[in-house]
Amino acid sequence: MRILHTMLRVVDLQRSIDFYTQILGMTLLRQKNYPEGKFTLAFLGYGDEKQNTVLELTHNWETDQYDLGTGFGHLALEVDNVYEATDKIKQAGGTILREAGKMNAGSTIISFIEDPDGYQIELIGVKG
């Protein structure tokens, strides 16, 4: 068994695709409209779905707002250098929730950013 994907519901699909591809460097792997269900699915990631876990963005055509809820925490992405990645995202117009630095009660270097719909994304350094 393996994890296939994480799904997020998004309000503006193109805005979210732009964020994940242009700011976080993912590739749009596939996208399909489901007219009978009035929704579109887009799958993005850092490699082929056969070998990598990907992100599924779901856009329900007639929904213009979601509550994030209290159960969802965040997505986590590994980066070579958290400081550089955070600065690059900031320069590209991304929202930084927590600047790069040591995690609370630990030595791992992390930062937190936010996607266009308010989902939190943790950046974790390769070397901790």
Image: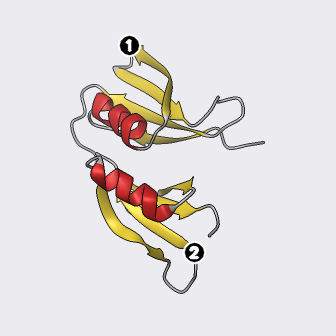
Disc 2 residue crowd, few under 14, some 14–19, many 20+, Cα 10 Å: some
**Numbered disc 2: secondary structure:** loop
Quadrant occupied by the C terminus: bottom right
> Mark 1 against mark 2, which lies toward the viewer?
2
Q: Which mark is residue 20?
A: none
- Name the residue nearer the viewer: 16 or 40: 16
Residue occupying the point 27% across, 36% down: 11
Residue position marked by numbered label 2 in the rendering: 108
Q: Where is residue 116 in the image (x, y as percent from the top left)?
A: 28, 45
Disc 1 residue crowd, few under 14, some 14–19, many 20+, Cα 10 Å: few
Separation (CA) of disc 1 from disc 2: 47 Å
Q: Is residue 90 shown to the viewer in this render?
A: yes
Q: Which kind of residue does numbered mark 2 sit on?
A: Thr
Q: Is residue 121 shown to the viewer in this render?
A: no
65 in relation to 31, above or below: below
- Name the residue nearer the viewer: 94 or 83: 83
Residue position marked by numbered label 1 in the rendering: 36
Q: Which residue lies furthest to the front in this view?
A: 84
